[in-house]
Amino acid sequence: MHTITQTFLAHFVMRLPQLCANCLPLALGAFVTALGSGATPATASALFEAAGLSQERFVLVAAPIGDGVRAQLNIYEQVKPTQPCFAIGPGSPAPVDPLLANFDFSGICSRFIDANGYSVRVGGADLATSYRLTVLRQSGDNVLLAVPTKAGAGPEMLVARTQGPGSGYLQLVLEPGWQLKRRVYGGRNLGHLYLFRDAWPEAAIQPELPVVAPIPSSGASGIER
């Protein structure tokens, strides 16, 4: 199985120059499908890397769902300064105006709205298939949690908070140790962000579960440009 995986990977890498940047995520999905349950921790660790970002170009938002009782994580990126993509108001929590919703933001902004667009990474471990990011409205605050979806995957982690109660679109402020990074494959930046920290929280044991990258869905993507 290991030999077959190596052969497939070599063939895939040789074909990378033929793949356009927009096709790359789908090609990676096909690669992951082929690996299936045979993926090993070493294979998963080697598949993707994480690249640094200009943090000021991004805002994390607790975005209301439906009647506003629940919220989900949205991440907005200012790609070009042509037109503002968002506006952050004063206060704690700070309200966010998603200005990109009012114009055609193609090439100007990016919007990451679900697990196809973002995931959790700790050090060299891509945790896309063993953790999910969820926003919870708690008494006195709104918190972004990284929640394990597999037994033994690791601890629940506090990633960000609005630093006060409220509803509507609110800025989520990252907790110490967390930052945004971009997923990279073979030196190419992908349309996927990591909620990243260098190491596991104190007293947490790093899991040894195999971790594989998520397969992009054939429907709507988690990123809009």
Image: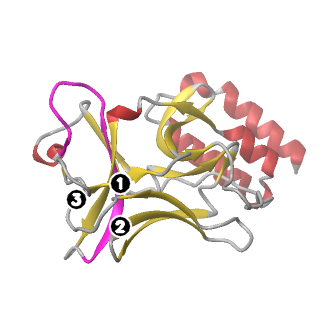
Asked whether, in this view, residue 75 is left or right of residue 100, the answer is right
In the image, what residue occupies the spot 61% across and 71% down? 149
Query: Could you classify mark 3 by the number of other residues whose Cα lies within 10 Å: few (under 14), some (14-19), or many (20 or more)?
Result: many
Q: Which mark is residue 142?
A: 2
| Residue 120 against residue 204 in the figure, above or below | above
Residue designated by label 3 = 169
Q: Nearer the viewer, residue 144 or 93?
A: 93
Q: Which residues are magenta?
A: 69-88
User: What percent of the width, then of the height, locates residue 51?
Assistant: 56, 31
Spatial CA span between label 2 and label 3: 11 Å
Question: Under tag 3, what secondary structure?
Answer: loop
**Closer to the N terminus: mark 2 or mark 3?**
2
Q: What number is the disc on residue 106?
A: none
* Residue 32, magenta (yes or no): no
Up the image or down, 99 lies above or below 209; here it is above
Contact, mark 1 vs mark 3 (Cβ under 8 Å) = no
- Of residues 199 and 37, the one nearer the viewer is 199
- Kindly tell me whether residue 221 is visible in this rendering: no
Q: Which residue is mark 1?
A: 172
The reply to whether the C-beta atoms of the residues labelled 2 and 1 are less than 8 Å apart is yes
* Three-letter residue code for mark 3: Tyr
* Three-letter residue code for mark 1: Leu
**Of helix, strand and loop, which one carries label 1?**
loop
As helix, strand or loop, the secondary structure at mark 2 comes to strand
Q: Nearer the viewer, residue 92 or 129?
A: 92
Identify the amino acid type marked 2: Asn
Write the residue at 51% across / 38% down. Answer: 181
State which quarter of the image contains the C terminus. Answer: top left
216 to the left or right of 170: right
156 in relation to 3, above or below: below
Q: Position of residue 63 (x, y in %)?
A: 27, 61
Whether residue 106 appears in this view of the structure is yes
